[in-house]
Image (cartoon, helix red, strand yellow):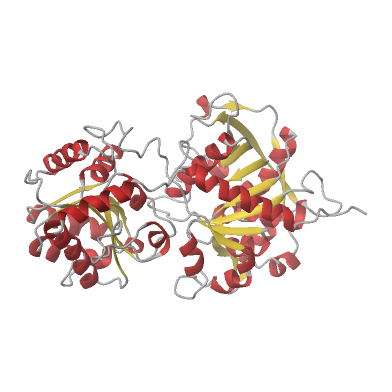
Amino acid sequence: MKILMISSEAVPFAKTGGLADMVSALSISLAKLGHEIKIVIPRYYSVDRSGLKQLPGALGVPLGGIEEWGGVYTAAMPGTGKKNPVTVYFIDHEIYFGRDGIYGTVFEPDFLDNSRRFTFFCRAVFQLCRKIEWFPDIVHAHDWPSALAPVYLKYAERVPDSAGGFEKAVSVLTIHNLGYQGIYSKDNFDYTGLGWDVFYNAGFEDWNMLNLLKAGLYSADKLNTVSPNYAEETKIQAHGFRLDGVLRYRSADYSGILNGIDTGVWNPQKDTLIPQRYAIDDLKGKAAAKKALQRYFGLAEDSSVPIVGMVTRLTEQKGVGDLFGPSYGSAWSICNDLKLQLVLIGTGESWCEHEIASLSSRLPNFGAHIGYSEELSHLIEAGSDFFLMPSRYEPCGLNQMYSLVYGTLPIVRRTGGLTDTVESYNEKEGTGTGFMFDDLTPQAIYNTVGWAVWVWYNHPEQIKAMQQRAMQQDFSWEKSAKKYLALYKEAQGKIEPPVKK
């Protein structure tokens, strides 16, 4: 197949979260399976043009009665080889993308013109295909910034008397986080160049506002999200962010495919960022990582005490309000009452950063690093015995999968992709790969951490068996890529190309 990935992010060029990792990893895996993959992202200010090749000529993009002009740069995706490389195209527009930040900055978290920025981007994608004379079988859009692409395909490109080239193309829209939808003033709609009948027929209208993701959900041929359980959760009001009705309406075309992980990077047998590599039959390297982790945070170097690790964004989605709030059962209680060590790396809400800094200065068994470090993240995954993720909701989650392959047992809330990837401990059978709880309360977090620590001290043989079971899990991207191929074929079977009069 010829597959076009449309995204606002892709590593190593632009990243704010897991979306960038997923787009690049899935593209590389599909290319390895023999498919022709092209990725399109904006050329942000942070993407150095000196390392890119510029395509000759300008790119004309018709929008709202005018024609915008941009440029196109290109580069090969690193690590894809010469036989079947993934090509990345960058849409260049200085006014829209020549600024700091992808969606906003610290001072302006959501750029006021984001609707226009990504409208231009989605329309430019189709003009790019015409410019390079390459037309995809699959148009795969990701999250709200790319959600207009399925709308344009359905209402402007795959219709009789259009400019042509996309008659056989079908669209897939992947939801990475339903909490972000691209909601702006409907005054921006004229800029799309679509008729106002499309505004209502395609589902743009949202309480007298413009909702880009909602329109994409109505228009795409197939929808999916990044784990099977999150697909079910988003169809109910509690997790649907007001779009649960749309997803129930589209339920026949909506499914969940679990993200994979990059096993070339996150693999204790190959990891170059930990003190000593290790495997399921020899965990000496894990013990070395634990010692190094304790030394890094200035904790007592005691192998008998379990370490609970965290690598997280300090936001309400990640449950930090319950973990670091003032209630009994929070991190203060956990560190005071339980014989363990707690280590954390993260950044986010300022109140939480200040609270963590205060706790780490007062608690001898709590070490924290505010910020981000790839090397320290790997060390925490390898050196910890447990990994805590008290998420309010989690579309997929990657850290629990990293933890499992490193033999670090997750302690997680039963939600989203955490439910799909972690098997809760069964005390009678001694089975499971982690510890799970349901209610997001300080007491529930406290009790579940206490449960894991109790098993550590009282059933070490079961902990070891759980570690071995965890390290046998297969989260490779090839497995997920094959499911996406099946989804693409389902989309192709759903559409009859239009017949021009």
Point 26% across, 53% down: residue: 466
Q: Quadrant of residue 494?
A: bottom right
Position of 476 compared to 86: left or right?
Answer: left
Residue 198 % position (x, y):
73, 65
Can the viewer see residue 183 in this picture?
A: yes
Q: Where is residue 349 in the image (x, y as percent from the top left)?
A: 30, 58
Q: In this view, does 291 lie to the left or right of 396?
A: left
282 relative position to 318: left or right: left
Residue at 7% from the left image edge and 46% from the top image edge: 302
- Please identify the residue farthest to the right as the structure is shown: 501
Q: Residue at x 56, y 63 (%)?
A: 184
- Measured as percent of width and height from the top left, residue 390 is found at 29, 63
Q: Is residue 176 above or below residue 196?
A: above
Q: Residue at 19%, 65% (x, y): give it.
A: 451
> What is the quadrant of the N terminus in the image?
top right
Above or below for 220 versus 14: below
Of 257 and 72, the residue lying toward us: 257
Residue 192 appears in the rendering:
no
Residue at the outermost front position: 429
